[in-house]
């Protein structure tokens, strides 16, 4: 649930940065890959990581997610700052 574009208020802002003719395909692929990756991580990775590493195993999954979220957020912030203003 962390990687996909959901029905939050920022969804139109994210989608407008994708090329017009590739928006549906890009959004669908992002949703599909995020669903598959989360199912694999939760069903296989989380059980074994918490069994062998305890709470540190959860942090092994959490830190890459936080880093990816921060990089994505900074990327879209930079796109918003650098866009040319339009009068219409």
Image (cartoon, rainbow, N blue to C red):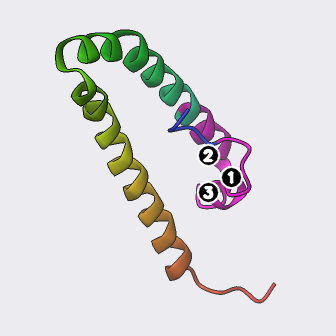
> Where residue 83 sits in the image (x, y, percent)?
56, 79
Question: Bounds of the magenta span?
Answer: 6-29
- Tell me: 41 left or right of 50: right
Q: Is residue 87 magenta?
A: no
Residue 22, relative to residue 19: is it above or below?
A: above
Q: Secondary structure at mark 1?
A: helix
Disc on the earlier residue, 2 or 3:
3
> Where residue 57 sits in the image (x, y, percent)?
25, 25
Other residues around mark 1 within 10 Å, as few (<14) / some (14–19) / many (≥20): few
Which labelled disc corresponds to residue 35?
Answer: none
Tally of numbered discs: 3
Q: Residue at x 23, y 21 (%)?
A: 54
Which labelled disc corresponds to residue 14?
Answer: 3
Q: Secondary structure at mark 2?
A: helix
Q: Residue at x 48, y 27 (%)?
A: 33
Q: Is residue 24 magenta?
A: yes
Other residues around mark 2 within 10 Å, as few (<14) / some (14–19) / many (≥20): few
Q: In the rendered structure, are the residues bearing label 2 and label 3 in contact, judged by CB atoms less than 8 Å apart?
A: no
Q: Secondary structure at mark 3?
A: helix
Q: Spatial distance from mark 3 to mark 1, Cα to Cα?
A: 5 Å
């Amino acid at each position: 649930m962390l990687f996909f574009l959901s029905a939050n208020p920022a969804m139109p802002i994210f989608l407008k940065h994708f090329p017009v003719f590739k928006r549906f395909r890009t959004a669908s692929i992002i949703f599909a890959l995020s669903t598959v990756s989360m199912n694999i991580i939760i069903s296989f990775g989380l059980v074994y990581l918490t069994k062998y590493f305890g709470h540190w195993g959860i942090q092994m999954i959490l830190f890459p997610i936080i880093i990816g979220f921060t990089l994505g957020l900074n990327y879209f912030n930079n796109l918003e700052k650098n866009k040319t203003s339009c009068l219409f």
